[in-house]
Amino acid sequence: RAPPWRRRRSRQAAAAAATGEAMGHRSSPSAAVVPSEDVAGPLSWTQDQLSAWLLERGLPCDITELFKAHWVNGMLACSMTEADLASMGVAHPMQRRRVLCELRVLFGASADAAGRT
């Protein structure tokens, strides 16, 4: 199964093809700009993009809001530790483990995809 950032690009490409933008026919000058997350993967994600992904993975809002409040983007999240999460305010050890597991899924999948290309 493709990592989330690959699936998002697929949905955008399908939408662009449906509107004729894939062939260079844009309806407006600002249409079909490819977000940087699709080009560079989750390492380039902002704290908003990362927290939205964590929320989609089922993490509670209070934890995902901590990522925004502490400006944790993709570059920082790829090397987070349990101590980092504790210092951010994620109190329960099992919640910290869950966050770290989800981050491993995200960055492990992107590293695997990069290694295959």
Image (cartoon, rainbow, N blue to C red):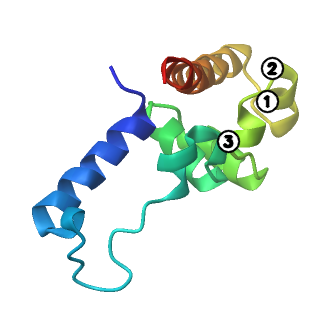
- Name the one closer to the observer, 100 or 94: 100
Q: Which mark is residue 85?
A: 1
The residue drawn where x is 80% and y is 20% is 82
Please say if the residues under marks 1 and 3 sit with CB atoms less than 8 Å apart.
Answer: no
Name the spot of residue 72 as percent of width and height, x first.
74, 45
Question: Could you give the CA–CA distance between mark 2 and mark 3, rounded to whole angstroms?
Answer: 16 Å
Name the residue at 72% across, 20% down: 92
Would you call the spot at circle 1 few (<14 residues within 10 Å), some (14-19), or many (20 or more)? many
Question: How many residues crowd around disc 2 within 10 Å: few (fewer than 14), some, or many (20 or more)?
Answer: some
Dot 1: element? helix
Viewer-closest of 41 and 46: 41
Q: Quadrant of the N terminus?
A: top left
Q: Residue at x 19, y 51 (%)?
A: 14
Rendered view: 105 above or below 66: above
Q: Determine which residue is flagged by label 3.
A: 74
Q: Which mark is residue 82?
A: 2
Q: Gap in Å between the C-alphas at discs 2 and 1?
A: 5 Å
